[in-house]
Every structure is written in C-alpha cells, then in structure tokens.
Amino acid sequence: MKNTIIINGETLTLEEIIQVAVYGTTVEIHENAIKKIKKSRTIVENIVKEGKVVYGITTGFGKFSDVNISNDECKTLQKNLILSHSCGFGDMLSKEITRSIMLLRINALCKGFSGISLETLNTLLLMLNKGVHPCIPEKGSLGASGDLAPLSHMVLPMMGEGVAEYEGNIYDGKEAMKMANIEAIELTYKEGLALINGTQVMTGVGAIALKQAIDLVKLSDIAGALTLEALRGIKDAFDLRIHEVRPHKGQIDTAKNILSLVEGSTSITRQGELRVQDAYTLRCIPQIHGAIKDSINHVKEKIKIEVNSVTDNPIVLENGDIISGGNFHGEPMALPFDFLAIAVSEMGNVSERRLERLINYQLNDLPAFLTPNGGLNSGFMITQYAAAALVSENKVLSHPASVDSIPSSANQEDHVSMGTIAARKALEVIQNTRRVLATEILAACQAIDFRENIELGKGTKIAYKTVRNHIEFIKEDKLMYNELEKCTDLLKNGELLKAVEEKINFNL
C-alpha cells in the first residue's frame, strides 16, 4: 500500500480511492495539476476584471442565471449558494464514503477546468489528510446539476460552518477546523459552484459499493463451491469446453474459479454417478455468476471514466472560453448504479435458492434443516426465512431510481438522474446480499460436517477451515443471530476471502 497518493485528475483508480477512503492514505496534488488550476483561476479573475456576464461567476444560479451580480456581491453570492443549498436530510454518510467524496472532488478540480483557487482546493485537501470529515446527510440529491445539497454540506466546514467529525468526535465546523489547525476560508468568484456542481457523491458512494461488490462476487463463487461440495454436485457442468462455445468472459471466469476451488475434492461427482443433472442454481453457477461479473466490470469501467472527469459547470477551457453545458448530469452513472443493484440482487437470489437446497430434506440426502436432532431443534430452518426476507427486500430496492425524474428550479432543470439514490440503493442491496451469502456459507459448512470420509477441494477446504476457526458445528439450537453475525464478519472484514485468495487466483 502506498504511503502517499499523488493525484492529477487523470489517473485515479478504484484501488487508490479505497486506500484513501478506507485506510486513510494521504494525498498530494501533482505539480502539473497545480499549473492547470492556477491557469484556470487566472481566466476567471480576468473575466471578473473585464466585467463579463458569465453564468455562475457574475450571475445567479439555476433559474436566476439571468440575474447579474456585481463584483462587490460575488463573495456573498458564493457563500449564500452553499448556505441555501445545504438542505440534506437523514443519516450521515459514513466516514469512508465522505472521504471518497472529498477525494473525488479534489481530483476533478485538479483537471483545471473549474476556476477554483489553489488556496481553496488546498483547504479541502488538508481536511482530507488531517481527518476533518464534514457530516453529510445521505438524502437530498437529485443527481443533476450535480450533487448540490450533499456537496454543500461538504463545503460548510471549509467556511467554518456546519458540522464535522474529527478524531472520532462530532464538532461544529469552526471548532473542528480549529482543532485540526486548518484556517477556514472565504469563497470567492465561482468557487462555491466549483465545489458543489458535480457527481462526486453518487460516484463516491458507488465506488465504495463497487469495491464491496467485487469482493462479494468472489465470495459468491466460494459459497457456490461449498454448496456443491455439500450436495455432491456434478463437476461436468463446469467443463471449460462448454463455456468456450458461449464465450461470455464472466461465464468462463466463473467456471475456472469453481474448478479451482473444488480441485482435488472427493465429494464432487461426475454426471451419471449419483444423478444426471443438478438443479439450475448449481449447474448454472457460471452463467448466473458470470453475468453478474460482467455487469460489475461494466460499472467499474464507467466509474473509471467518471472519477477522472470534469463534472461541474460552467467549464473553463484552456483558451479562455467558458461554456455552460451539462457535465454535472448524473445519468451516465445513474444507469450503471441501478445495474449494479440489479446484478448484486441476483447474487442474493441464487444464493438463497442454494440455501434452500441445503436445508430442505426433500431436495437432498441430509438431515432436515441440518440439525442432528430435528423436532426438538429447528436448526437452520429460520435462516432461510431471514434470507428470503432480504432477497425480497432487494427486489424492491432494485427498482431503478433512474427511470424517475422530478423537474426542479422552476422547470429549468427539467430532467434529473436520481443517480445518488441509485448508488445508495446499490450499497444497501450489497449489505443484504452479504448476509445471504454468509448464511449459505454457514449452512454449507454445517452440511459438509454430515459427510463422512471426504476430502474437500483446494479452495473449499480453506474456506471451510476459516469458518470453523470461528464457528463450531451447531449440534443444538443456540442464538443463531450470533453465529450468522460471526460469519457475516468473516465476509465483511475480508478474512475469508483473503485466506482463499492465498491459494486461488480468482478470475474476474
């Protein structure tokens, strides 16, 4: 892991975002980006000196774009913009998401097309590096004209306003800045607009969601392989020859992953040994998981573009032209984030159905609900109820936010993306699906313990041992919530995936 990440607005990666957002890696601005920032600022200052009428610099915003603002009022204009736009509602975004948002906004401004001063940008950079995290309500963005409301909450502490988290405690913005020895600023020409007119909240949430989805789809292969072991699944369905004649990358990658995970297993069977075919949720793991992988990779490509793009308005071009366009509109990310929610929802759907095959004695040769003493004990019976509730909730959350639009700003902004809602929904679907996968994995390990004299595969053996290092075989009913929490933590903290990845090179 890098000690410092140098950003230039061009090359920021998902891995670097996670390093800064989750692990607190410090950030510096590349010297070439500094030159671009200064040049762009000079253009804005010259416009003000010449008295030109330019949207957002010497005019009001939105429907008030036809109202000219005098030089004396420009500072008040920018301050009022932030104060009036800070209309968020709901729980505060997590520290990791907030850091992701701050980093993405800094990176976008590093491209040098926004007219912000280097001093103002350095203030936000200092906040990120010193851990002053603005408290940003999760709700209130339409995802067009940028994430105006939440980004305004990000800016408040820069001005000595609002609320911020610092060293684990919540303070008013002025106090947090003082404690971190960062001087609050007074915004000038275009700076307020440059800070809030962009897609960094939806993309910041989406980047965190994407990283979790990437880990989760690998874990779904592990879960599927464990269930195959427990149910003595048929290996032939993963023969690469049948996947190469339908060459979707995700499908082929999944087949390779499963074959690697179960390599050396004595539990896995061949077609005709016990049965001719497995049910779809086993036999079609490559097709189902593969489509999810392809969807996730599509979202990754879109995020890669967006995090290194100019998304505010107006855009200050290098030749001095200032063009008012629509790069703030979140539609390019709203659709992918809706797609991400749908893809991960499917991951939960197939996992819950495999869970049913593990605990339903009518569908296998195992004890009912995986308990040695059924009747007195319910075993894993209600784990499937809870998983079914989560996948049902995911279906509601997977209704696309991007198909809705409510006009705003007196119908000037007459189509909006709802992209931030899409990103937040995707993250919630991921959290639900993680619990479903944890339930399948725990049930599969329980089922494996009923098999005698078997050798698990190269990867499934490690997964099984990792679970058993923390959770014992459940002989009698106990507080199942605690056992599920332990297994969920193994997925969330990365321990299970890390252990398996030391032996298995996942294709994705």
Image: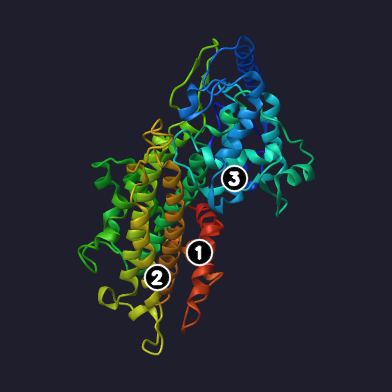
Amino acid identity at mark 3: Thr
Q: Residue at x 58, y 33 (%)?
A: 81
Task: Give whichever of 359, 29 is nearer the camera.
Answer: 29
In terms of sequence position, does the residue under pointer 3 or pointer 2 come before the other?
A: 3
As measured in the structure, the alpha-carbon distance from the residue carrying label 1 to the one carrying label 3 is 24 Å
In this rendering, is residue 358 above or below 53?
Answer: below
Colour treatment of the image: rainbow
Residue 255 visible to an observer of this rendering: no
In terms of sequence position, does the residue under pointer 2 or pointer 1 come before the other?
A: 2
Residue that numbered label 2 is attached to: 386
Q: Secondary structure at mark 3?
A: helix
Residue that numbered label 3 is attached to: 98
Amino acid identity at mark 2: Ala
- The percent coordinates of residue 32 (x first, y second) are 64, 19
As measured in the structure, the alpha-carbon distance from the residue carrying label 2 to the one carrying label 1 is 14 Å
- Residue 186 lies left or right of residue 152; in this view the side is right
In terms of sequence position, does the residue under pointer 1 or pointer 3 come before the other?
A: 3
Residue that numbered label 1 is attached to: 488
Residue 214 visible to an observer of this rendering: yes
Identify the residue at the far bottom of this view: 376
Label 3, residues with CA under 10 Å away: few <14, some 14-19, many ≥20: many
Label 2, residues with CA under 10 Å away: few <14, some 14-19, many ≥20: some
Q: Are marks 1 and 3 in contact (CB under 8 Å)?
A: no
